């Protein structure tokens, strides 16, 4: 028999002890002495705390205690009763002595206690001796539940190389047994798997590092933790949990190049930015701890550059400046890899960097010609004669064999006729004089091509500035409208003028104004130069008369300060206005216009009156004609028309076509019919023409078509009755009279007699004469 069975047997004996007959009296006395403190003052109940052990199986009810009144004289006169939770089913009471029995197996984890009420009644009087009192029966726990890890399986992470004793994680198990009674719920933790790297605290379940571990050696460990109840005593229940412990990376490893020497090559034709090659330094760490930056040490950092590929952690060597095989054929650079993020706690382990040597050979290539300058700026004076030298561009073949170079201009439409270049020496000349006022700058693209390999071409930009020459005289900036009143006084300013010049002036433009020589002695107006590139026109006399002179034309002489100075004569028109002090511009323009036409105001009024009368007469005629057009198209007095116009697209069939339409409808005077829109004939004709290739005039389709056209003609008021236009898409089958055409006839016109034409009257005399003469000639 194991210890657990012994323990249950002892608990049962303890429970049965209060119910034994030999000890009832002493038990009652001890109860009175021991539990005086808990006895109620106003009642005479005597009982001990009641406990029932869980998971107890018995064939007979088990006594768990006794209720007794101090008024009970052991004569059986009192009756004990029990009510409340489980009364009568789980718990029963002996009505004579108050002993309580449990009849079923209890489970403390489901219900830890029961609340009941007891009462003692006098059998003779049926009156309560003791008032109803409430008491509790507690279910005593036994170790019947195993520990459980509710949060498992566990996963934890701890940095690698953590010192001994570092806390990793904590595991916790639970036990459903009563922690306040015995050791059933007292747990003890132990390590089943995980030594010698980890340890666990027995009471708390905290897992700690037992030694330093390197992630690069092993990055994951599986630890098994056991939890036992009963403080690990024999017979205790246990449970295990699995803890997966991952070692997180720290930067404890420097980068290391896989090679101590790299060999690479690059063509001298390679443009800037070309990838020359790649180097790689390996780092055992991962993530950011393995991130590194590459650098180039030494004097060649101006020719080559290195960048880091963050995805592959490779160093990519790029061409920073063009290389020349003829100048230098070999380069040696030192590349360095340095960790981007360094843990200062590991600096004592050494520098977290590494270096390697890279040898780069320059490969020879057939290079295009090279200009002495990427762009050229040249100057030439405007108006230079054709063939004037603008400048010279020079290019050479950088290869060792030195191929000759041929020059040309990439011509645009207008530059092709302005410049040309000597293909041998690169001299640029003009092909016609240049005008700065049209274009002050010209951009030319010059190409240099190897004569031995025409595919090798280089370009250079040439900027040609056309220098200004004083070849444009100053002039008025606009057409001035100058007016003067008839009562103007002498010395009155009537106009301020200025000038513009298309040429440039290094010192700034300065213009001089004066009257031309032919008007220098004018007795009407004068010019005053303001010395600020403006001038004023002043009157010389007082009073002007429009009847004497309506316009005055002043020749103004304007001179610039160029070398040599240029002058121009600009005419200023002064109009005399009928005004007192202020000039009415609109009225003056109107008067000037009438003066130019040679008309007076009275004459203009007469002309306008004639035009108005003509318009009224024209509108009256138009109105009358419109009213005449509104007459009904069919009136009772309309004369009878007997005209039937039939149009054919093909050769007709003779009289059968005429019989197809009832001409009597045109002779009948009918009233206006209800308007019916005509159908669109064009599309129907095309459709029916296709059908006519398969059906004849006797077909139902043909007859339906003719009927529809006839119906439309009868009901359409927009078509006059004397004009019937019918379109047929069918060819006729012939007439009884036969064909009137001489085509295909076996007889000739010579066999026919035309003498009957003379009997038709004077209207057919001409035709009879023609056929008579034709027969005579034939004979």
Image: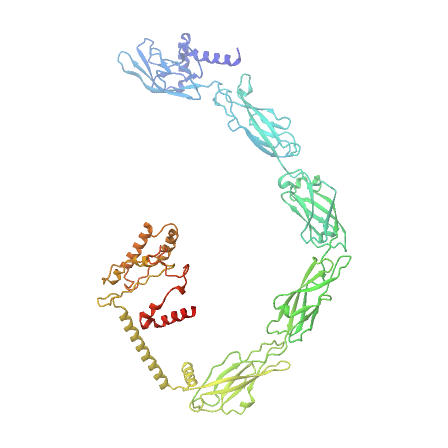
Residue furthest to the front in view is 779
- Colour convention: rainbow
Query: Could you say where residue 598 lies in the image, as x and y percent from the top left?
Result: 41, 86
Q: 258 or 255, which lies in front?
A: 258
Residue furthest to the top in view is 22
Snapshot quadrant of residue 289: top right
Query: Could you say where residue 82 lies in the image, as x and y percent from the top left?
Result: 34, 16
Query: Could you say where residue 44 lies in the image, as x and y percent from the top left?
Result: 34, 17
Residue 677 lies, with reference to residue 292, above or below; the image says below
Snapshot quadrant of residue 745: bottom left
User: Is 546 on the left-hand or right-hand side of 335?
Assistant: left
Residue 329 lies, with reference to residue 433, above or below; the image says above
| Rendered-image quadrant of the C terminus | bottom left
Q: Is residue 40 visible?
A: no
Q: 21 or 150, which lies in front?
A: 150
User: Is 672 on the left-hand or right-hand side of 509?
Assistant: left
Residue furthest to the right in view is 401
Residue 590 lies, with reference to residue 358, above or below; the image says below
Q: How many callouts does the rendering have?
A: 0
Q: 627 or 594, which lies in front?
A: 627
Snapshot quadrant of residue 449: bottom right
User: Is 60 on the left-hand or right-hand side of 289?
Assistant: left
Residue 527 lies, with reference to residue 170, above or below; the image says below
User: Is 550 on the left-hand or right-hand side of 343?
Assistant: left
Query: Could you say where residue 178 lies in the image, as x and y percent from the top left?
Result: 47, 22
Q: Is residue 222 visible?
A: yes
């Amino acid at each position: 028999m194991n210890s657990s069975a012994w323990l249950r047997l002892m608990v049962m004996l303890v429970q049965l002890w209060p119910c034994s007959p030999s000890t009832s009296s002493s038990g009652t006395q001890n109860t009175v002495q021991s539990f005086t403190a808990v006895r109620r003052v106003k009642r005479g109940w005597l009982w001990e705390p009641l406990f029932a052990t869980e998971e107890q199986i018995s064939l007979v009810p088990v006594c768990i205690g006794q209720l007794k009144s101090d008024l009970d004289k052991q004569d059986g006169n009192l009756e004990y009763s029990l009510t409340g939770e489980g009364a009568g089913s789980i718990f029963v009471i002996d009505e004579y002595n108050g002993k309580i029995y449990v009849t079923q197996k209890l489970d403390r984890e489901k219900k830890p206690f029961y609340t009941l009420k007891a009462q003692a009644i006098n059998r003779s009087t049926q009156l309560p001796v003791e008032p109803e009192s409430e008491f509790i029966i507690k279910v005593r726990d036994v170790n019947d539940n195993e520990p459980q890890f509710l949060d498992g399986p566990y996963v934890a992470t701890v940095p690698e190389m953590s010192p001994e004793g570092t806390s990793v994680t904590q595991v916790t198990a639970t036990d459903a047994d009563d922690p306040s009674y015995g050791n059933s719920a007292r747990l003890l933790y132990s390590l089943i798997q995980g030594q010698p790297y980890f340890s666990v605290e027995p009471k708390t379940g905290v897992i700690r590092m037992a030694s330093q571990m390197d992630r690069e050696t092993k990055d994951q460990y599986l630890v098994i933790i056991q939890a036992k109840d009963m403080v690990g005593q024999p017979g205790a229940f246990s449970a295990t949990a699995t803890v997966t412990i991952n070692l997180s990376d720290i930067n404890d490893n420097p980068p290391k190049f896989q090679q101590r020497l790299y060999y690479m090559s690059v063509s001298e034709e390679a443009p800037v930015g070309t990838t020359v090659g790649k180097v790689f330094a390996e780092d055992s760490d991962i993530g950011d701890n393995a991130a590194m930056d590459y650098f180039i040490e030494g004097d060649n950092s101006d020719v080559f550059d290195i960048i880091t590929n963050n995805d592959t952690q490779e160093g990519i060597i790029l061409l920073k400046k063009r290389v020349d095989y003829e100048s230098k054929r070999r380069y040696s650079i030192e590349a360095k890899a340095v960790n981007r993020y360094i843990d200062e706690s590991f600096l004592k382990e050494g520098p977290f960097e590494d270096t390697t040597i890279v040898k780069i050979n320059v490969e020879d290539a057939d290079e295009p010609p090279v200009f002495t300058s990427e762009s050229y700026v040249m100057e030439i004076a405007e108006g230079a004669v054709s063939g004037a030298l603008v400048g010279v561009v020079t290019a050479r073949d950088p290869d060792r064999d030195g191929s000759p170079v041929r020059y040309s201009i990439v011509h645009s439409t207008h530059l092709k006729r302005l410049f040309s270049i000597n293909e041998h020496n690169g001299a640029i000349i003009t092909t016609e004089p240049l005008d700065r006022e049209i274009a002050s700058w010209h951009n030319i693209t010059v190409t240099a091509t190897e004569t031995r390999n025409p595919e090798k071409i280089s370009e250079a930009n040439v900027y040609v500035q056309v220098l200004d020459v004083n070849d444009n005289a100053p002039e008025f900036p606009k057409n001035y409208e100058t007016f003067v009143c008839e009562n103007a006084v002498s010395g009155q300013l009537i106009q301020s003028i200025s000038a513009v010049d298309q040429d440039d002036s290094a010192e700034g433009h300065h213009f001089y104004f004066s009257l031309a020589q032919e008007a220098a002695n004018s007795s009407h107006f004068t010019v005053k130069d303001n010395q600020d590139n403006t001038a004023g026109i002043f009157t010389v006399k007082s009073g002007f008369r429009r009847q004497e002179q309506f316009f005055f034309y002043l020749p103004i002489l304007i001179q610039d300060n160029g070398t040599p100075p240029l002058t121009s004569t600009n005419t200023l028109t002064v109009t005399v206005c009928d005004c007192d002090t202020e000039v009415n511009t609109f009225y003056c323009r109107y008067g000037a216009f009438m003066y130019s036409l040679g008309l007076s105001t009275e004459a203009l009024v007469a002309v306008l009156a004639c035009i108005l009368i003509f318009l009224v007469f024209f509108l009256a005629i138009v109105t009358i004609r419109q009213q005449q057009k509104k007459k009904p198209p069919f009136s009772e007095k309309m004369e009878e028309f007997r005209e039937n116009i039939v149009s054919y697209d093909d050769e007709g069939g003779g009289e059968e076509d005429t019989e197809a339409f009832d001409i009597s409808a045109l002779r009948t005077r009918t009233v206006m019919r209800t308007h019916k829109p005509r159908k669109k004939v064009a599309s129907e004709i095309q459709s029916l023409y296709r059908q006519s290739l398969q059906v004849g005039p006797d077909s139902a389709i043909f007859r339906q078509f003719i009927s529809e056209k006839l119906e439309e003609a009868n009901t359409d008021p927009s078509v006059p009755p004397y004009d019937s236009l019918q379109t047929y898409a069918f060819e006729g089958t012939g007439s009884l009279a036969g064909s009137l055409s001489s085509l295909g006839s076996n007889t000739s016109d010579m066999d026919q007699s035309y003498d009957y034409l003379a009997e038709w009257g004077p209207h057919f005399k001409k035709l009879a004469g023609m056929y008579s003469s034709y027969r005579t000639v034939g004979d």
